[in-house]
Image (tube, rainbow, N blue to C red):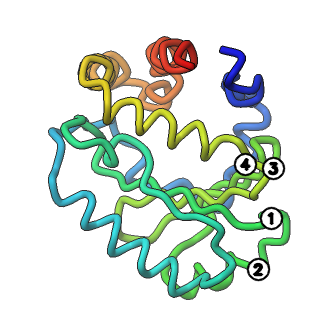
Amino acid sequence: MAAHPKELRERQVGTPEQQASGLVGERPQRWTGSVAIVDYDPSWPARYASIAALIERTLGDRIISIEHVGSTSVPGLSAKSVIDIDVVLEDTADESLFVPALEAAGYRLLLREPWWQGHRLLIPATEDVHLHVWPASAVEPTRHRLFRDWLRAHPDDRDLYASTKRRLAVETAATPDDYTMAKNDVIDQIFARLFAQP
């Protein structure tokens, strides 16, 4: 475990007040229903590539890195059909440096979470895409890449994660806001195995 710094090993969770205060504008209608987990779709990588190309054209050399993360980035993993993308910029505090350009490309700022390593979330109007924008100082994009790469290389944990997500989608059908937090136990178990490796 010594190979992985503490800030990388520890999951950061905001207070309910912090989480509630981050919403910018109206909650999208598509976030209000129960969670639907579907079989892996081989078209997801191509969807990511198309979206990433647009983001790269929009933000240009402001981008330090851009990555397909989340469950749709793991071949064979059942998932919500949402393309999660991590974009790392030098800083996110000055939103004028990236939000207007992304708005012109069809995205809108949905979450502003300075408490969570400067995270910003933008979404387009029609497509299920979560564009996570992080400052270079954030460790969460590294956690996302580690988790993705671990699941790609460890089918047992990939299948455990898939079955857990399907079960939790049913269990939280009446309270879909609980779904994401409900996954934390299995995510922590998988990270424990990941971080136990040298």
Indicate which label's residue lies in the foreground, 3 or 4. Answer: 3
| Mark found first going from the N terminus, 3 or 2 | 2
- The kind of residue on which mark 2 rests is Leu
The structure residue drawn at horizontal position 53% and vertical position 40%, both measured from the top left corner, is 144
Identify the amino acid type marked 4: Gly
* Camera-nearest label, 2 or 4: 2
The residue sitting at 44% across, 15% down in the picture is: 186
Q: Give the labeled residue for mark 1.
A: 91
Which amino acid type is shown beneath numbered disc 3? Pro
- For marks 1 and 3, give the CA distance: 11 Å
Residue at the image point whose x is 68% and y is 83% from the top: 100
Residue underneath mark 3: 114
Q: Which mark is residue 22?
A: 4
State how far apart marks 2 and 4 are (Cα): 19 Å
Mark 1 or mark 3: name the one nearer the start of the chain.
1
Numbered disc 1: secondary structure: loop
3D distance between C-alphas at marks 1 and 2:
9 Å
